[in-house]
Amino acid sequence: MGNSMARSLRFSPLILGIFLLAGFLAYLNWPAEEQAQQRRGGGATPVVAETVSVEPFAIVIEALGTAQANESVELTAQQAQTVKLIAFDDGDIVEKGDLLVELNNRAEIARVNELEINIADAKRQLQRIENLAKDRVASQQLLDEQRARVDALSAQLDVAQANLSELKIHAPFSGKLGLRQVSIGTLVRPGDVITTLDDIERVKVDFNLSETHLASVSKGQSVTAASVAYPGETFTGQISTIDARLDPMTRSINVRAIIDNPEGKLRPGMLLQITVQKRVLNTIVIPEKALIPNQEKQFVFVIEEGIAHSREVKVGERRPGIAQITSGLSPGETIVTEGTLRLRDQSPVQILDTK
């Protein structure tokens, strides 16, 4: 009988329920006991901290724009003729005035030579008539007719020389050539593209800004540009032009900047991220990782006498990795920057490093 009573007590649901309730109450009281133990000096959470200070903080405007060559042209022929000479290779750097292509010019050279001979003969005739006119042997009418003939031949020579010069294509400015589109013997016609020429020592970038930023930008203002092709590298320049009109649909204004490109890294067509500096504030700036979001509010842990206190702060402008604090912190206070996830309000902390 004693054994049967022991078995009934051992498996009684009431006793099992009492044990479960005791365990649940112990679980609920564990954080309070842990915090009490921490307040007594044990279990301090290791953290990395930073002293709050006032620092220069640049307020910037960011926009996207597409790079364009400072000067760009498609080189074409002005007359229909075959290619006689090609004096460049793909991608060459050329100077202003360099000969690039020469078209077949035998007929034009012959025409120029013919006119030069005719002009020389006409001038000799004119000189003879002028001498005769001095002795009143030749009439004034004959003298005028010969002068008119010399002038007409000279005008024809100018036209022939112009036609001859059009058969030589020179670089209109210094820059970088594109791909060659013709070969020797190719018949080119007016408008046919021979190659392209771009001046990329500086590039133009057009971008749009909201009308709210209109008062913050001006001609000559410094800008920086970045491209995904060159991570971590920036290119500097200045605003060269601000459009006179706003777009009535988007309420934005078009701005053009000239970006220095001495090494030729930026190419026409590249997408660039433009940063315009509006002004520089002296304000409290903290690492963005120190912020703890809670719904629509932001908090930080402020360390006072080894205890971390949760405090609400107001965040202003943000930059990658940093944030401006407009209220809630004072210079000289110490905040937690690493280890915030392991903290609760009033948690004791052990500072491993202070920046």
Image (cartoon, grey):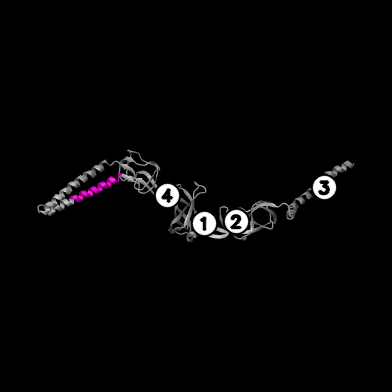
Q: CA distance from mark 4 to mark 3?
A: 88 Å
User: Label 2 is placed on what type of residue?
Assistant: Ile
Tell me if label 4 and label 3 are in contact, CB under 8 Å.
no
Q: Which residues are magenta?
A: 149-167
SS class, disc 2: strand
**In the rendered view, does 214 fall on the left or right side of 40?**
left
- Circle number at residue 60: 1
List the residue tagged with mark 4: 201
Q: Does the CB distance between marks 2 and 1 fall below 8 Å?
A: no
Please give left or right for residue 7 compared with residue 264 in the image: right
Mark 4: secondary structure: strand
Q: Pointer 1: residues within 10 angstroms few (<14), some, or many (20+)?
A: some
Q: Which secondary structure lies at badge 3?
A: helix
Rounded to the nearest angstrom, the CA distance separating label 2 from label 3 is: 56 Å
Q: Secondary structure at mark 1?
A: strand
Query: Is residue 85 at all visible to an observer of this figure?
Result: yes
Quadrant the N terminus occupies: top right
